[in-house]
């Protein structure tokens, strides 16, 4: 009976883990003008900006802009820049210091650290189809340490090269020029880690042009303690039933 209870606990744990799957935050799921900062359980979105040594966290709205939306007509805010400085600002804040560099980036803070983040977005192509601005997503752990990064542009090897639709550059995939507006390209950035150590991601352009995300996806990874308590509880239930039948 104990063995049966443990088997049942294992199966239920597996089902519980499977239920904690992919979470999608798509600007097109909301009406334009909607505050989506806390609209999706498990993640808080903000426009993270720094000016004169002061950090601010402004709400993110579903913004109507069919010219730059990678899909549909809405984006998760827009005009994000200064990604090169985000890693310094986040670490400064984590260590209790005032951030030094100006920036305005898209930020997502996860309620539980995750091991997978995917971002669909768009960015300026610069002066022509062969001059690509850098857009980058950086991932950080709970202490503000940089865990991983994924970029599309010069750093990903696309500067001076006209990519083909669907072409991959490591973690980045070129999805083609925007169907709505000349000078804008769509892309997908993906970060996956072995451990669930991504607590925060930030995204923006590293150069003068601005970038805009349309969709954010991440795995909602259950806490190890939650799974352990669930397993222990199921095992206790099985043991109690066994004792009653043994009397």
Image (cartoon, rainbow, N blue to C red):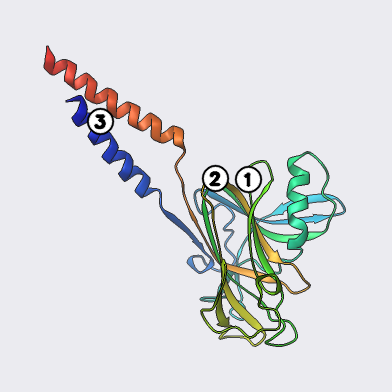
Q: What secondary structure is found at the residue carrying circle 2?
A: strand
Quick check: 175 left or right of 14? right
Residue toward you, 92 or 153:
153
Separation (CA) of disc 3 from disc 1: 34 Å
Q: Which residue is mark 2?
A: 113
Q: What is the spatial separation of the Cα atoms under label 1 and label 2, in whole angstroms?
A: 8 Å
Helix, strand, or loop for circle 3? helix
Occupied quadrant, residue 181: bottom right
Decide which of tag 2 and tag 3 comes sooner along the chain. Answer: 3
Q: Residue at x 37, y 45 (%)?
A: 17
Comparing 154 with 125, the one in front is 154
Instruction: Quadrant for the N terminus, please.
Output: top left
Camera-side mark, 2 or 3:
3
Quadrant in which residue 206 is drawn: bottom right
| Mark 1 element type | loop
Residue 191 in the image: state x and y as whole percent: 56, 59
Which tag, 3 or 1, sits closer to the chain's start? Answer: 3
The picture quadrant where one finds residue 247 is top left
Classed neighbour count for the residue bearing mark 2: other residues with Cα under 10 Å, few (<14), some (14–19), many (≥20) = many
Whichever of labels 1 and 2 marks the residue nearer the N terminus, that label is 2
Q: Residue at image x 74%, y 56%?
A: 86
Residue 214: x percent and y percent? 56, 69
Figure check: 9 above or below 219: above
Residue at the disc numbered 3:
6
Contact between labelled residues 2 and 1, with CB atoms less than 8 Å apart: yes
């Amino acid at each position: 009976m104990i063995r049966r209870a443990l088997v049942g606990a294992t199966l239920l744990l597996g089902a519980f883990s499977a239920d904690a799957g992919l979470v999608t935050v798509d600007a097109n799921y909301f009406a334009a003008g909607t505050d989506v900062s806390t609209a999706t359980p498990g993640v808080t979105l903000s426009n993270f900006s720094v000016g004169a040594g002061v950090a601010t966290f402004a709400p993110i709205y579903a913004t109507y802009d069919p010219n730059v939306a990678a899909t549909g007509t809405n984006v998760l805010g827009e005009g994000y820049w200064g990604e090169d400085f985000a890693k310094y600002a986040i670490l400064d804040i984590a260590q209790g210091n005032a951030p030094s560099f100006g920036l305005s980036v898209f930020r997502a803070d996860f309620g539980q650290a995750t091991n997978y983040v995917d971002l669909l977005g768009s960015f300026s192509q610069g002066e022509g189809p062969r001059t690509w601005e850098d857009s980058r997503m950086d991932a950080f752990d709970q202490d503000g340490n940089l865990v991983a990064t994924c970029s599309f542009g010069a750093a990903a090897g696309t500067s001076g090269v006209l990519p083909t639709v669907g072409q991959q550059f490591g973690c980045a995939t070129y999805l083609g020029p925007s169907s709505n507006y000349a000078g804008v390209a769509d892309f997908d950035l993906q970060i996956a880690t072995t451990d669930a150590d991504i607590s925060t991601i930030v995204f923006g352009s590293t150069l003068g042009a601005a970038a805009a995300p349309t969709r954010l996806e991440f795995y909602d990874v259950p806490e190890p303690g939650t799974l352990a308590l669930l397993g222990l509880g199921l095992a206790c239930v099985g043991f109690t039933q066994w004792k009653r039948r043994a009397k």
